[in-house]
Amino acid sequence: MMVQVDVFWSYGIGASFATAAARQLTARNVRTEHGGRWSNPYLMGALLYCAVLFAPSGAWLLWGFPDWETMQVARGHGALPAWLVALFAATNVSQGVLGFWVAERLIASGRVYAAFLQAGIGYVGMFFILVHGWDGRGYQRFFSADRDSFAAWPRQPGAGEALARAADWLTSPVALTLYAMGVVLVPAMLALMVSWIRSGQREAGEAAPVTSRRRILAAVLGAVFVVALGTAVAASVAVHLLGWWLGVPAAALLAALLVVRRGGAADRAFAVLALPDRRGGRGRTAGLLGVR
């Protein structure tokens, strides 16, 4: 999706894949490894997703819409050095592997909820850049098909004007391209995650029923578009009202109290996924019984 955004998004994707395979990864650490790290089929799944689908989509957008893909920074292909393009393509894969590796290490130590939060860090970072950016105009850069459209935004638009401009963007060529990509990227990612969560529950042979696909999808989409996006919007509001020096600590404190802590919004989504966690076995049981 955007050069400045994809570093966080790919990290979140990698961590999400590892978390979805938490049961299988735990079993692999208990058994004797054979063939080395790169024989891990779940890491290979995450790597292939990032390399075959995610990175090419970013390259497509950068070539087709260089101004939008760089958040209206580049004026065209001539403004993009070759090394930056290569680095962008590489990080779309390497950050996904990094996110998977960090989450996998946490899972190996029994800290599955911490691994789940790694995905949240990636998505909150992504949404904060989209909403706020570096100058408070991230959403304006996103809802502008090109530099001319961005230049036409007033510095402080009213709600009605902002909504009207966003509505115009929804039918722009870049938006239509995103829709087409989303038809492939999103179902592929969700299908892998749902499959790994459910197969891990079946293989574990636990007494509790396997979580339904609908509940898993609701939890994942809620964690992304309600919890992570809501946290990013709240952080943007805090920075607008208090400035960077006070707004960032205030946003971090609110996130710690309302989102991250056990019993918070993130923990509730984690409980629905019923992932294993040493603080209470199946995530759902831990959340409902208040085991910490």
Image (cartoon, rainbow, N blue to C red):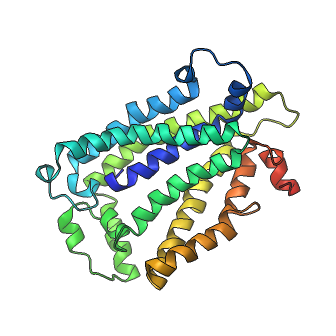
Quadrant in the rendering for residue 35: top right
> In this view of the protein, which residue sits in the foreground, 64 or 183?
64
In this orientation, does residue 205 appear? yes
Horizontally, is 242 left or right of 27 in the view? left
Horizontally, is 166 left or right of 283 in the view? left
Residue 165 screen position, x and y as percent: 31, 71
Residue drawn where x is 38% and y is 48% of the image: 179
Q: Is residue 245 above or below residue 126?
A: below
Q: Is residue 120 above or below residue 141?
A: above
Q: Is residue 159 above or below residue 260?
A: below
Residue drawn where x is 73% and y is 21% of the image: 31
Quadrant in the rendering for residue 135: bottom left
Residue 264 screen position, x and y as percent: 72, 63
Q: Quarter of the image containing the C terminus?
A: bottom right
Residue 282 screen position, x and y as percent: 80, 42
Q: Is residue 185 above or below residue 133?
A: above
Residue drawn where x is 51% and y is 53% of the image: 122
Horizontally, is 163 left or right of 228 in the view? left
> In this view of the protein, which residue sits in the foreground, 7 or 158?
7
Residue 167 screen position, x and y as percent: 35, 66
In this orientation, does residue 199 appear? no
> In this view of the protein, which residue sits in the foreground, 206 or 281?
281
> Which residue of the protein is positioned furthest toward the top in this rendering?
35
